[in-house]
Image (tube, grey):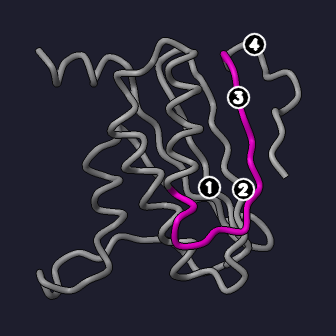
Amino acid sequence: MNHATDAPPAEIGGSYRMGFTVGEHSARHMRRILRVFLDRWGMARLADDAELALTELVANVVRHVPDRRCTVLILRRPEGLRVEVADADPRPASPVRGGDALAEGGRGLLLVEAVTDRWGTLPQAPGKTVWFECDGQRQVDRIA
């Protein structure tokens, strides 16, 4: 079920929470939703990086979470955007460094790290939340 969250704290400029059972094509729909909110919030310049990072986090749920259920939270913050993906799998999320350069998997979180300002993981019973933040200023600096 998709629904808007309750009124956010004053430091949060807007939010949206979605609960999903995800499949192979779910990230496409989530990217559209994310872009709508970024456009509405005047943060369209963050869309490309945020969509890539969200796609990678959703792909991890599809690949690694047995029931493929997750909750996506999009938060508008004064300095930019925060996106969280929570699931019930307690295994930690961590980037795979080194290894086979031609391997099909294992580099999604490295992409998240490359296109966001911050990211991390929080253990949360029964699983975890993986989050990232994109600051508006960093995007402007990239273009200049």
Judged from the image, the secondary structure of the residue bearing numbered disc 2 is: strand
Q: Earlier in the sequence, mark 4 or mark 2?
A: 4
Circles 2 and 1: CB distance less than 8 Å? Answer: yes
From the image, tell me which residue sits under label 3: 15
Residue positioned 54% across, 50% down in the render:
131
Give the residue type that dot 3 points to.
Ser
CA gap, disc 4 and disc 1: 22 Å
CA gap, disc 1 and disc 3: 14 Å
CA gap, disc 3 and disc 2: 13 Å
Q: Earlier in the sequence, mark 2 or mark 1?
A: 2
Q: Earlier in the sequence, mark 3 or mark 2?
A: 3
From the image, tell me which residue sits under label 2: 71
Label for residue 10?
Answer: 4
Magenta region, residue range:
13-27
Residue positioned 72% across, 68% down in the render:
21
Circles 4 and 1: CB distance less than 8 Å? Answer: no
Q: Relative to 69, is 101 on the left or the right? A: left
In depth, the one of 32 and 121 nearer the eye is: 32
Vertical order, 63 against 1 (above or below): below
Q: Earlier in the sequence, mark 3 or mark 4?
A: 4
CA gap, disc 3 and disc 4: 11 Å
In depth, the one of 23 and 103 nearer the eye is: 23
From the image, tell me which residue sits under label 1: 85
Q: Relative to 33, is 104 on the left or the right? A: left
CA gap, disc 4 and disc 2: 22 Å
Image spot of residue 19 (x, y percent): 77, 55
Judged from the image, the secondary structure of the residue bearing numbered disc 1 is: strand
Q: Nearer the viewer, mark 4 or mark 1?
A: 1
CA gap, disc 2 and disc 1: 6 Å
